[in-house]
Image (cartoon, rainbow, N blue to C red):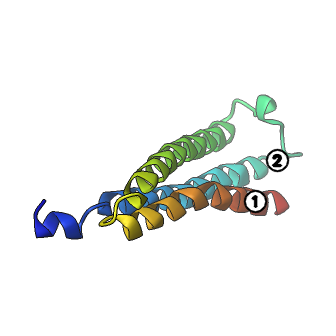
Amino acid sequence: MSQREQQTEGRWAVVVGAAAVVATTVASGVLFKGYLALARIPGPIPRLDEIPETAAGQAAKSWMVTGVGLYVLAAVLAVVAVAAGIHFARRPLGYSRGVWALALGACTPVLAIMLLSGMGAT
């Protein structure tokens, strides 16, 4: 293994972990935008199975579906980051990057719960 490969071992795992955190944050914003669009529909806020078939209702539903899709992407990225973090944390040259990838991947579900509960509080 060359000197350059030794210095960069596990860097991609940290990037994937960081992407999971960013995807979680974006997903929360997109989902909340859909919820706010749903709340702007006149009358009481409808249940998800009672969203009216209007342009505003469809736009709100579209934002919410996109947000959920981004949450799924974030979950997949988090699982990859945790698995790669465990792999690299066991190696002497990749220990520090493995620990970072593991930490970023593990904090993603906690971040999602915090952001979702914050949205629910509003």
Residue 50, picture quadrant: top right
Is residue 111 placed above or below 84 in the rendered structure?
below
Q: Nearer the viewer, residue 48 or 102?
A: 102
Residue 53: where, in percent of width, then height? 70, 29
Q: Residues within 10 Å of mark 1 (few under 14, many from 20)?
A: some
Q: Residue at x 55, y 41 (%)?
A: 72
What is the quadrant of residue 114 in the picture? bottom right
How far separated are the C-alphas under marks 1 and 2?
Answer: 20 Å
The residue located at (55%, 42%) in the rendering is 66
Q: Which residue of the protein is positioned furthest toward the left in this rendering?
A: 2
Looking at the rendering, in which quadrant would you find the N terminus?
Answer: bottom left
Q: Is residue 84 above or below residue 22?
A: above
| Residue 92: x %, y % from top left | 33, 65
How many residues crowd mark 2 within 10 Å: few (<14), some (14–19), many (20+)?
few
Where does residue 109 sit, x and y in percent of width and height?
Answer: 63, 54
Residue sitting nearer the eye, 1 or 9: 1
Left or right: 97 as drawn, with respect to 54: left
Quick one: SS at disc 2? loop
Q: Amino acid at mark 2?
A: Pro
Q: Which mark is residue 119?
A: 1
Q: Earlier in the sequence, mark 1 or mark 2?
A: 2
- Look at 50% across and 46% down and name the residue there: 79
Give the mark toward the camera: 1 or 2: 1
At which x and y percent is residue 27?
57, 53
- Which residue occupies 77% across, 47% down? 41
What residue is shown with label 2? 42
Image quarter hosting the C terminus: bottom right
